[in-house]
Amino acid sequence: MPELPEVETTVRGIRPHLEGKRVQALLVREPRLRLPIAPETADLVAGQRICTLSRRSKYILMGLERGTLIIHLGMSGSLRVVPATSPPRRHDHLDLVVSDQRCLRFHDPRRFGIFLWTAETPQIAEQQHPLLSRLGPEPLGDQFDGDYLYAASRGRRIAVKSFIMDASVVVGVGNIYANESLFLAGIHPTRRCGRVGIDRYRRLAEVIRAVLTESISQGGTTLRDFVQEDGQPGYFAQSLRVYGREGEACKRCGEPIRLRRIGQRSSFYCARCQH
């Protein structure tokens, strides 16, 4: 699914085309997403100005004058800014038409996305909305570092890979980025999180920041279902060190990359470089 860098790339791509514009209409072709789009949403947002566009974890927050649209891309969703007269494709489930006769078009073949209205401001929604209030700190923010990870891991027995993928611990470290970060930090993905020392957590936090920042700068990770808001795929997949490389030689030591399941997710690692 689209991960934090893909969502950040999307927000940065659509923001210049939408902030300051006024919503003319919300056209819903298919309301049956992961959470159904409430019938009154179109009337609630029409006429409001788009004040801000931001991201919290993998949620896009569109701040309007009297509330917030909470958007999630789900497993296969994408957003594009297109002319309002452009014919919709299959799985183009809704258009948010704005004042310059363009629209934000939501495409979601699997319909696992979210397009939800709340009367809360983005700031209050982050603190109080059920989808957002229990999320951990942002990995690129000031509250996240190795000391925080060390403290949060004490007394816990789960694998370190599952630990850093827990959104209540830190948001946005999806499967690809967890694999890559643990490799670069030299930590075996199955090691119990409570047995990782503070120095190694400090290294891991630095690496997580670097990997996510690199991915954002390259447009996100190329996945089967993901394209950027301009319709082009990301390029970070060209830089992957272990993810998806089972049986191939480790780029650092030459040992074959191994694959195992951890927490129902595919985990790729080098047995020689990670311990």
Image: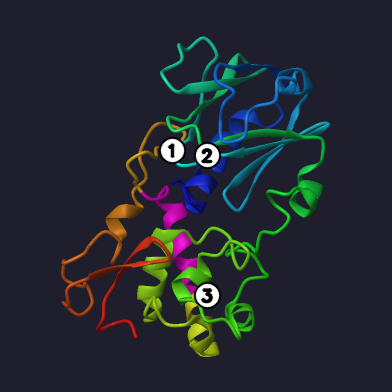
Can residue 271 be found in the magenta stretch? no
Q: Amino acid at mark 1?
A: Ser
Tell me where residue 261 appears, x and y as whole percent: 34, 66
Query: Amino acid type of disc 2?
Result: Leu
Q: Which residues are magenta?
A: 206-221
> Which secondary structure, mark 1?
loop
**Circles 2, 3 touching at the beta carbon (< 8 Å):** no
Where is residue 246 drawn, in percent x and y?
A: 21, 64
Q: Is residue 210 above or below residue 201?
A: above
**Of marks 2 and 3, the one in the foreground:** 2
Q: Earlier in the sequence, mark 3 or mark 1?
A: 1
Left or right relative to 48: residue 90? left
Residue at 69% x, 51% y is 132
Which residue is label 1 attached to?
A: 76
The answer to whether residue 136 is above or below residue 202 is above
**Residue picked out by circle 3:** 205
Q: How is the image coloured?
A: rainbow
Label 2 sits on a secondary structure element that is loop
Residue on which disc 2 sits: 73
Q: Nearer the viewer, mark 3 or mark 1?
A: 1
How many numbered dots are placed on residues in this image? 3
**Residue at (22% x, 71% y) in the render:** 257
